[in-house]
Structure formats: C-alpha cells, structure tokens
Image (tube, grey):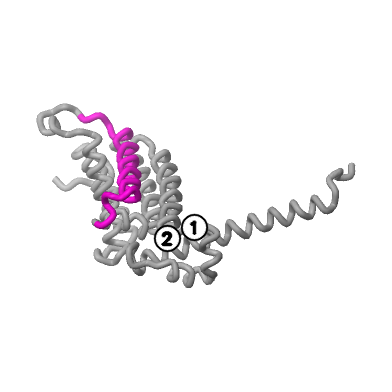
Amino acid sequence: MADPTPRTARAADAAGRELRARGRKTRRRLLDAGIDVFARRGFHAARVDDIVKAAKTSHGTFYLYFSNKEALFAALVADVADEMADLAASLEPITADAAGREALRAWLSRFSELYERYGPILRTWTEAEIDQSELGRMGTDLLGELAVALAAQLPTPKRAKARDRIDNDVAALALVAMIERFNYFVLSGQVGADRDAMLDTLADSVHDAVFGAAAEHRPRVS
C-alpha cells in the first residue's frame, strides 16, 4: 500500500529529524567541551569563549543551546543526576561472603567510570565558593541520595556495645565520602594507585567496614 503522506511532507519530516539529530550532537559536543574546560580551568575561571573553542563551534551556536556557562553546567548536573540515580538503583544488598564483595567491587567500578567521566563536575560541587549555591546544593543532594541507596543495602547492625552509636545513614554517608574522595585522589594523580588497586582497596575497605571479622573476601591473618 502506498504511503498517503505527500512527498513534500515526508521530505520535510526527514529533514526535521536530521536537524534534531544534528542538534543533539552539537549540544553533546558543547557539553563534552564544558567538561574538558571545567577540568582544565575550574568552574570560576572557565569562560564561554573557552568552551566554544574546545567545541570548535561559534558563540552563536553556543547561545542557541545555553544562555551562559551556568546553564551548561546545570545541564551537566542533570546528566550526572540521571546516571547517579541509575547507579544507586543498580546496587543490590551487600552480603558478607566473597560474592557480596565482588558485587560491591563491580558497583564501585561503575561509580569510578561515572566519576572519571564527570569528575570535573563532581569536583566543582566541592569548591568552597559555590558550596552554598543552588548547584552546590544539587551536588550535595545527589551524593546524599547515593548514600541513602547504600544505607538501604547495608545489613541492620547488631546492637552490640561497640555498635550502639552507629547509625546506618551516617555510616553510609561516610563511606560514600570516602569512595568519592579516593576516586578523586587516584584519578587526579595525587595517590599512586592504578584503577584495579583503587577498586580492590575500596571494595575491601567498605566490605570490612560493614561486616568486620565476618567479611569473607580474603584470607585472614590471625
């Protein structure tokens, strides 16, 4: 059966799809350029001119998509938020056995991949100058949501004396802070560890922190 849509309409629709696809690619190029510029210059020193040059496009094109660098940064924050939500949802209950440790390491690897891609954005959230800004609060909220997801998968602590003062939510936030900072130190070259060593260290540290002597991920020295 022949397509009843007039040829001119079909051509216009195809052209519209091509423009939209091209627009998405251009917007993505600007976002990736923003990540690069924020990494090299920092949020406050970065200029629209730097982003335009890195994206190899014009100021006019930039302003078709973003009103200023803050708007571009906010779009990057939204990207991180979506990926952080997916990461949080992918975390399964943590168990004391070797399989639990390996599942935790795989999750930490996904966090590291996200951090490696969006590290400049995550680090910007920690800059003292913007800690009280809306963007700073968004970053804090996202890491807080990750901590909530981790807390939900931690086993309920036994209320022995040594753990009477432990709060799962606070403990999870402390662990997320450790995970984020260690990724920062390794990926910025401030700590001389490769990615595998970083992931093993984090997996063992978190697993031990949660389960103590009950953790079964490696032989114990008596």
In this view of the protein, which residue sits in the foreground, 109 or 152?
Answer: 152
Residue 33 spot, x, y in % from top left: 46, 65
- The part of the chain drawn in magenta is 129-157
Mark 2 packing: few (<14 Cα in 10 Å), some, or many (20+)?
A: some
Asked whether the viewer can see residue 145, the reply is: yes
Task: Name the residue: 42% across, 62% down.
Answer: 35
Q: How many marks?
A: 2
Displayed quadrant of residue 207: top left
Q: Which mark is residue 66?
A: 1
Disc 2 marks a residue whose amino acid type is Lys
Asked whether the viewer can see residue 98, the reply is: no
Q: CA distance from mark 1 to mark 2?
A: 7 Å
Quadrant for the C terminus in the image: top left
* Residue topped by disc 2: 69
Residue 46 spot, x, y in % from top left: 37, 67
In this view of the protein, which residue sits in the foreground, 64 or 216?
Answer: 64
Q: Is residue 11 left or right of residue 211?
A: right
Q: Is residue 197 above or below residue 175?
A: below
Q: Is residue 37 above or below residue 178?
A: below
Residue 148 spot, x, y in % from top left: 31, 37
For mark 1, give the secondary structure.
loop
- Magenta stretch: includes residue 133: yes
Task: Name the residue: 25% across, 35% down.
Answer: 169
Quadrant for the N terminus in the image: top right
Identify the residue at the far right of this view. Answer: 1
Please, what is the dominant secondary structure of the magenta stretch? helix
For mark 2, give the secondary structure.
helix
Residue 107 spot, x, y in % from top left: 38, 46
Disc 1 marks a residue whose amino acid type is Phe
Task: Name the residue: 30% across, 56% down.
Answer: 183
- Magenta stretch: includes residue 91: no
Q: Which mark is residue 139?
A: none
